Image (cartoon, rainbow, N blue to C red):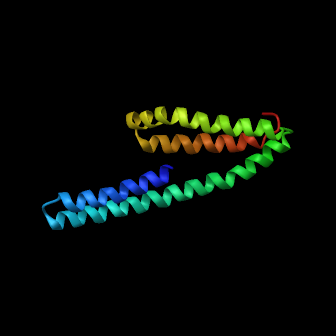
Amino acid sequence: FGLRAFLVLCFQGQIVRKHSDPDIADAAYSQVAFVAMCKRYLTVYALGTLGDWMQGGHLFALYERYGLGIREIAHLFAVGYLSAALLGTYAAAFGDRYGYRLCVVLYGAIYAAVCLLMNARSV
């Protein structure tokens, strides 16, 4: 859903920019910059989504190895998605306040720590 909404916004942004700027040269530059931003965003979004999809099967196998049943694993996945949906707003506000670069670095560090801890049997 998010990807479709972004694509629609990109397309609408191109139409609005094309018809609202009186200066053609400025409009062309704005459109080129906008399309470049869309391509960069979509590339990073696609790579992130691919990584998330690839991780799902590995997490399922890891949880199974820990002795969890299919129902318990399904609950873990559901809680993960719900917490991401609920906390996403606060994460965005944190990024607005402290900067997105800091958020990316924190995310990478926390994610790396979680990946290491998931392989420890005693945790």
Residue at (64%, 45%) from the top-left corner? 112
Q: Nearer the viewer, residue 68 or 2?
A: 2
Image quadrant assignment for residue 114: top right
Q: How many marks?
A: 0
- Pick the front one: 103 or 36: 36
Residue positioned 13% across, 63% down in the render? 23
Considering the image in quadrants, where does the C terminus appear?
top right
| 93 with respect to 21 (left or right) | right
31 in relation to 89, above or below: below
Depth check, front residue: 111 or 17? 17
Instruction: Measuring from the top left, give residue 90's x and y in whole percent.
Output: 47, 32
- The image quarter containing residue 86 is top right
Q: Is residue 25 left or right of residue 100?
A: left
Tell whether 10 sits left or right of 121. Answer: left
Q: Point out residue 82 in the picture as x, y percentages from the top left corner.
A: 60, 35
Figure check: 59 above or below 21: above
Residue found 36% across the figure and 57% down from its top: 10
Residue at image point 50% right, 36% down: 88
The image position of residue 85, as x and y in percent, is 54, 36
Q: Position of residue 118 (x, y in %)?
A: 74, 41
Q: Front-most of 12 and 104?
A: 12
